[in-house]
Image (cartoon, rainbow, N blue to C red):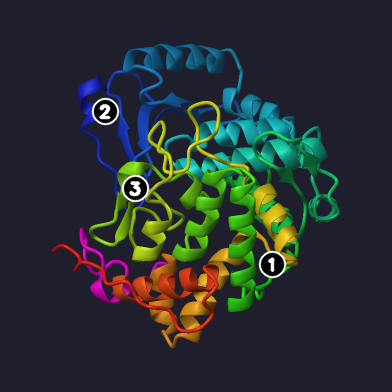
Amino acid sequence: MPKLTKRLVDAMTPSPLGEVFLWDAELKGFGVRMMPSGVASYILKYRNREGRQRKLAIGRVGALTTEEARTLARQKLAEVAHGADPSAERQQIRQAITIAELCDLYVTEAEGRVKASTLAMDKSRIERHVKPLIGKRTVISLTPADVAKLQSDIIAGKTATERGEGRGGVTTGGKGVASRTVGMLGTILEFARKRKVVKENVARGVERPPEGKQRRFLKPAEMKALGAAMREAANDGENEVAHAAIRFLLLSGCRRMEVLSLPVDWLDPEGGCIRFGDTKSGAQIRPIGASAFAAIADTPRRNGWVFPAARGKGHFVGLPKVLARLCEKAKLEDVTVHVLRHSFAATAAEMGYSELTIAGLLGHSVSGVTARYAHVPDNALVSAANRVSARIAAALNGDTGKAKVVQMARARR
């Protein structure tokens, strides 16, 4: 067993079967533990004055050098020799931390391990809902009843805010937000349980409200009314970027943030697809119809975004308010941004496409459809996307009968 060095630590490889340990020959109990995920930490194993074996995490590999970790390990062993129990003392401190402090610790630990877009959403829910409602509670005092009350308070809109007339629109409560927030809290409390901050995850037994499937979709006559409202609003000088985003959402079936945060470089009109670097399901090639690409052919492209913000270097975000104004003008009720995606799916279903094909068009993870080729969109899906987008484009333009299909170039191999 050699002395630990940076070279030996860097050469460690994770095992899918469990933790991997590498112990130091010079300082007894000092070593490195690597998790199956590849995350490695310096640790110290010792016995307290009662003879009980303890294991203490000293710090992450990369955050500390091997020699810095060895110095800290020696200091902790000196404390043990004088009767201290560093692991137990750290445990007592952790048990006194608040929910807010635990959330901050989770976010720090999750950096680099959790997908950036997922972590950004977690941070938003933590700051908007968790910290204001239960952030001051200690972790060990939290009960299932507290989690259930958190959920009901979010549903009731206690953490809803109006962001004013600027970017971002309105943050509301509701069953969906509450359910997802409690699910995230369960993940954070599981993180605490694995680190022995708490003995049980009190969020796991809380019944979450069903979010329900989206049933609202736009019929051809409603699409015609929306299209007319958009043309009228455009003549009055309304935001052309917002209108283009709404059209593209309806014509492509994409999710809201997939469209609003879409870089120009991901567009491939010739191949009939968007080459997403990141989506809810990971990197993906999404088939997109010719009519959808035509809807954004003349939109301004600034700072690398397909739908840029009017000010600054970011992308456009204030879509719900624009859509609400258009729907009021068109006399349409209960139309959210997600209804646009559902309308695309409903149109595809009405045209006779199978659930498997529709799943591929929407970007769901479907083995053998969206993942058939690593670099090339599926020709059958491109054809379907072309026909569905043409039907919707015709309805927006006032033709609620059968649409003329725009022919696409064959996808490149």
Contact (Cβ within 8 Å) of mark 3 with mark 2:
no
Q: CA distance from mark 3 to mark 2?
A: 32 Å
As drawn, which residue projects farthest toward the left? 413
Residue position for label 1? 211
Residue position for label 3? 277
Give the residue type at disc 2.
Val
Looking at the image, residue 340 lies above or below residue 49: below
Few, some or many residues within 10 Å of mark 3 (<14, 14–19, 20+): few
Query: Tag 2 or tag 3, which sits nearer the N-term?
Result: 2
Residue 134's quadrant in the figure? Answer: top right
**Residue shown at 38% from the left, 58% from the top:** 294
Residue 200 appears in the rendering: no
Residue position for label 2? 9
Residue 170 is one of the magenta-drawn residues: no
Q: Quadrant of the N terminus?
A: top left
Few, some or many residues within 10 Å of mark 2 (<14, 14–19, 20+): some
Give the residue type at disc 1.
Glu
Q: Which mark is residue 193?
A: none
**Residue shown at 69% from the left, 33% from the top:** 166
Residue 371 picture location, percent across and down: 28, 66
